[in-house]
């Protein structure tokens, strides 16, 4: 249901609309550990869009960056640490 909502908001409001970005963040956070790769990919898209729309220093963008870093597993610890800086 959340995925359908995201698709509809993206179509109606546009992929960079704040409502679409909020739905994207909700969907990424709802995914369980079995779908971590998909959740991480969605979170990366969200970070890119928020950075473009809000700017790289905006609190919403920084929050998305922190969320992405926490999703990364220990195999990519260096990349995750780089995001936290």
Image: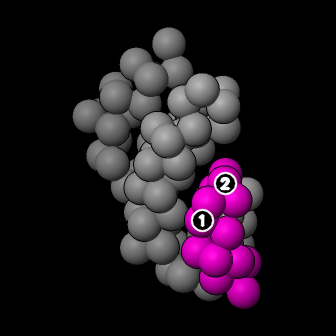
Q: Residue at (50%, 13%) from the top-left corner?
A: 1
Q: Position of residue 16 (x, y in %)?
A: 37, 55
Q: Is residue 7 magenta?
A: no
Q: Position of residue 73 (x, y in %)?
A: 66, 54
Image quadrant where one finds the C terminus: bottom right
Is 52 on the left or on the right of 60, as rendered? left
**Label 1, residues with CA under 10 Å away: few <14, some 14-19, many ≥20:** few
Secondary element at tag 1: helix
Secondary element at tag 2: loop
* Image color mode: one colour
Q: Which mark is residue 76?
A: 1
Q: Residue at (33%, 48%) from the top-left corner?
A: 15
For label 2, the residue is 73
Residue sitting farthest toward the top: 1
- Magenta residues span 71-85
The kind of secondary structure the magenta stretch mainly shows is: helix
Q: Which mark is residue 43?
A: none
């Amino acid at each position: 249901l959340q995925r359908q909502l995201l698709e509809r908001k993206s179509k109606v409001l546009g992929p960079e609309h704040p409502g679409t970005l909020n739905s994207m963040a909700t969907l990424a956070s709802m995914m369980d550990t079995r779908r971590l790769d998909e959740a991480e990919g969605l979170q990366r898209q969200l970070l890119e869009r928020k950075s473009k729309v809000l700017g790289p220093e905006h609190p919403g963008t920084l929050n998305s960056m922190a969320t992405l870093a926490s999703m990364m597993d220990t195999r990519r610890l260096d990349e995750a640490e780089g995001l936290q800086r």
